[in-house]
Each structure stands twice: as C-alpha cells, then as structure tokens.
Amino acid sequence: MTGQPARITIFVGAYGSGKSEVSVNFALWLARTVRKDGQRVILCDLDMINPYYRSADARALLADNQIELVASMYANTNVDVPSLPPQVFSVFDNPDVLAVLDIGGEDLGARVVGSLRNRLAGEDFALNLVVNPYRPMTGTPEGIAQAAAEIESATGLRLHGVVDNANLLEVANRHLIEESYPIVTEGARLAGLPVLFAATMEVPEVADGTERSDVAMQADVRLDDSILVALPVLNLVRSIHYPTDR
C-alpha cells in the first residue's frame, strides 16, 4: 500500500464476503507495517448480523500482535443485539489510535455505520466495501454496484472503494482473483469507485525468489501483469475458522 491509510478504516460487506478476515489482516498490516511509536491499533468487531464468523475469533492472534479488540459481549454466542460496545467511541477521541471497524453490510450493519455518522464527521476515515464475486448478490457488476448503492443510501456516507476478496474458501485463491477481476472492476466502475486492493491467501515471492510469510500490502506484487498491474495485495493469514473446517 502506498501512502498513509486512513486513521479509521471501516469494512462492510455482505454475508460470505470475507470482510471479517480482511478486517483482521488489515489490522495486522497496520500493526506490523504502519504503526508508529505511541500509536495503538484497535479492531472493533461491530458485526451485529452474524454471531458465528467474526473477527472476535482471532482474539489470540490479535493479542500476540498488540492489537486491542473491542467486541460485543454477545460475540461468539447465539445471542446478539444491535447495540455498540461503549469502548468503540474511544477510537474517535484519541488521534493516536489506528482503528479498523468490522461491520456487517446488510441493512442492520449499514444502520450501525449510519449511527456513527456524527462521530465520523471531520475524522480521517475510509468506508470500504469488501466484495466476493463468488457470492450470490455480488456475482455480477450490476450486483456489486447495487450493493454499493444500498450501503451508501443506508449509511448516508460515500464509499471510499472496493476490496476484491474473490474466494471459495480455498487457501490458494489467486486464480479466482485473476478470473473474476473484470467483474469486480466493472462493478466498481458502475459504482464510481476504485478497486483498492485484492486479498489473497497465497504468499507471493519477492525479488530474490524467497516467500514472504508476513502480512504485507505491497504495490509491487502483481497477480497477472497483463490484467492486474500494480494492484496492491493484502496477503491473508487465516484467522477465522468455520464449522466445516477440518
């Protein structure tokens, strides 16, 4: 990633988009690459939609990287209420905090973002839509554009861009990104948004031929020079597991 990310980065996305995995790994990237002395990284799990697959699952990994987690007291239970943990408001009051907000993209999730609109006013923030083109509602450019429009309407905020997270729950998903990238870029174009970066489980090689094992956002990693020139890539470390995992 070139340049400085927003102080507050919000990820929204429909069920199955993988936004919680992206949120966790983006927080890891902030902690390992962006954070300066005296800064804190806080991940707020505000997904009120799905109590099962959430960034709170990655609690130990986050703690190991000195990332603070704010989550609903009902996270990882079968009880959930549309209320925000009071600690979330601290991210707006401390300019030394780099915050990631993981929020469901359906109607209720969008309303959660909308409830924070006054707090976000005047803040350096980015509202990003995570898209998985292999999920039903975002499998076409028109579906992606519609999802973006619905979130902007419900939140009253303009999206900053689209994150391409093409996957079928496979560890190696680079070929899926290459295959579906035209769909994502056209959907983003219809929505008037840029594609910010792609998320991949594959570990790219660096110049000397060795593999990178750390989380990295790099403008020089290319999935396919003929299609994805200079697209930044967030290399994902699997942190959230599903009941079907073995």
Image: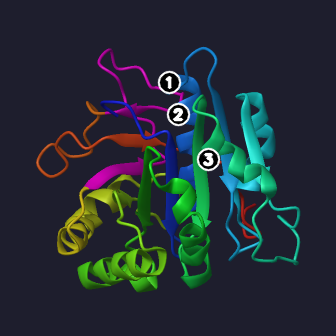
Foreground residue among 205 and 159:
159
Residue 165, relative to residue 220: is it above or below? Answer: below
Could you tell me residue 119's position as x and y percent? Answer: 57, 56
In the picture of the structure, the residue carrying the numbered disc 2 is 29
Residue type at tag 1: Thr
Query: What's the mark number on residue 24?
Result: 3
Residue bounds of the magenta highlight: 195-218
The answer to whether one can see residue 173 in this image is: yes
Question: How far apart in space, not on screen, are marks 1 and 3 (Cα)?
Answer: 14 Å
Q: Height in image: 72 above or below 150?
A: above
Q: Is mark 3 on a helix, strand or loop?
A: helix
The answer to whether 64 is drawn above or below residue 132 in the figure is: above
Residue 29 forms part of the magenta stretch: no
Number of residues whose C-alpha sits closer than 10 Å to that of mark 3, classed few (under 14), some (14–19) or many (20 or more) = many
- Which residue is labeled 1 in the image? 33
SS of the residue under disc 2: helix
Quarter-of-image position of residue 37: top right
Q: Residue at x 35, y 66 (%)?
A: 158
N-term-proximal mark, 1 vs 3: 3
The main secondary structure of the magenta stretch is loop
